[in-house]
Image (cartoon, helix red, strand yellow):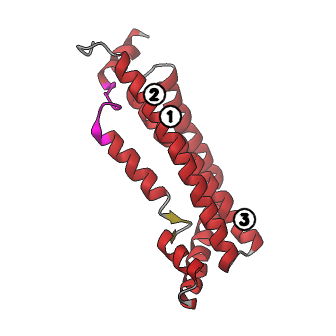
Amino acid sequence: MAFLDNIFGLIDMRSFSSVWYWIVLALYWSSASQSILGAPYDLIVRVRRGDNPQNAQDLNDLVAIHVRRRLTLMRRVGHWIVAFSAAVLTTIGVLAVIYRLEFAQAVMLILLPMTIVRLMGLRLAFRVEREHMEGARLCRALLTHRLWIQVLGVISIFVTAVWGMLLVMSRSVLGF
């Protein structure tokens, strides 16, 4: 056990006090809400306004392509993706909770919500395929999905900020 403590002591990074961690977190959540099932937000807004009928066709085609690609991948190797994701999340979770590595905690606070966003996207893809969504109904579903991603992002950033602040404030002034 002492051997593991020495190894983990060497790789324990100060993630929450690094500006780069917060930049990565902000960039992830910004990009997560900009493209829903491959459709950029501005295209969804243009279709909703009804400026050009070609925009609606572009949106339907773009979403159909991304839905087909995502569902084909999940139907072929989805069980491997789930197994690998579960193994990675479990490993990082053990390092974060049991060994209390700050770097693992920081990664876990990004990966866990990211996994939830991916599952929400997969659920929406199955729904779009099952209900053959197009036009205004598709726009409504994509915008609702974007809203829930933003809600999850706000909660995630809040929890990460509070946890990071508590961790940084609990260290001694000299960093020991």
Specify which label sits upstream in the sequence, 3 or 2: 3
Q: Position of residue 168 (x, y in %)?
A: 35, 23
Left or right of 165? Residue 82 is right
Please say whether residue 133 is visible from this viewpoint: yes
Q: Secondary structure at mark 3?
A: helix
Where are the magenta residues, as a range?
A: 11-20
CA gap, disc 2 to disc 1? 6 Å
Q: Which amino acid, mark 1?
A: Val
CA gap, disc 1 to disc 3? 30 Å
Residue where numbered disc 3 is placed: 127
Contact (CB < 8 A) between labels 2 and 1?
Answer: yes
Residue where numbered disc 1 is placed: 159
Residue 144 placement: quadrant: bottom right
Asked if residue 145 lies in the magenta stretch, the reply is no
In the rendered image, the vertical position of residue 79 relative to residue 144, given as above or below: above
Left or right of 35? Residue 17 is left
- The numbered dot on residue 163 is 2
How crowded pointer 1 is (Cα within 10 Å; few <14, some 14-19, many 20+) is rated as few
